[in-house]
Image: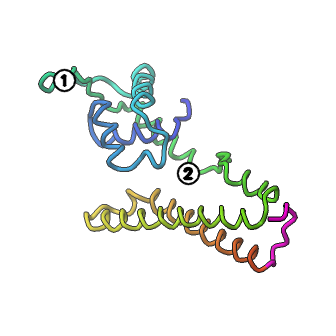
Amino acid sequence: MPQLTPLGVTALAVLAEGDMHPYEMYQLMLARKEDRVVRLSPGSLYRAVERFAADGLIAEVGVEREGNRPERTVYSITPAGRAALRESIAEMLGRHVNEFPEFPVAIGEAHNLPAGEVVRLLGERVASIRETIGFIDASLAGIAARGVATAHVLNVHYTRALLAAEADWLDSTISQLGTGELAWPGPSN
């Protein structure tokens, strides 16, 4: 069974909650802010649904129509789909994958910029991260108020922890650059 993409896992997990059509899946994923975790577009979701149907991971269970809107095919996850979902989640949980984010490249080459510019840019980054942490904290408070179990939003807690660690590291690096503790080989300001 092929390894599912992050979008594939998210889409099958939504269908594991109940039968729905792709547009409903997309709207639910947006409402849950899944687009902050996986690359999500209507086209990519619809292509994934087509692949799942062709691979027997989901099955058509009906067609709905509301007013003048086009017909919408409703899908259900199959036993093979549940197995693929579980297998992919287990694989993703158990191994580390280098996802090649761009920030490590930029910070590794930051010495090509003047220290003052690096301090300014890292300050902008840490401010953006702290803003995102504030958004996450407000979201988590709303989630908790609705009684959603933490197990259902571990990804949000994980993301917050990563961002907090990065913000702390950035604050320390900015401080070291400011005090001269971190010698800077780059061009002068």
Main secondary structure of the magenta stretch: loop
Residue shown at the point (71%, 71%) measured from the top left = 173
Query: Is 78 in front, or is 33?
Result: 33
Q: Which residues are magenta?
A: 180-189
* Whole-percent x, y for residue 70 in the image: 22, 20
Identify the residue at image location x=63%, y=49%: 95
Task: State the count of labels.
Answer: 2
Q: How many neighbours does mark 2 have within 10 angstroms: few (below 14), some (14-19), or many (20 or more)?
A: few
Extreme-right residue of the structure = 185
**How far apart in space, not on screen, are marks 2 and 1 (Cα)?**
40 Å
- Mark 2 lies on residue: 93
Q: Which SS class for mark 1? A: loop
Q: Is residue 86 above or below residue 176?
A: above
Task: Answer with left or right where residue 160 lies relative to residue 118.
Answer: left
Question: Compared with residue 114, is residue 7 higher up or lower down, i.e. above or below?
Answer: above
| Kind of element beneath mark 2 | helix
Report which residue position mark 1 lands on: 69
Residue 184 screen position, x and y as percent? 84, 68
Name the amino acid, label 1.
Answer: Arg
Task: State which quarter of the image contains the N terminus.
Answer: top right
Residue found at x 36% / y 43%: 29
In this picture, residue 143 sits left or right of residue 104 = left
Q: Mark 2 belongs to which amino acid?
A: Leu
Q: Sequence order check: which comes first, mark 2 or mark 1?
A: 1
Residue occupying the point 71% across, 54% down = 104
Q: What number is the disc on residue 181?
A: none
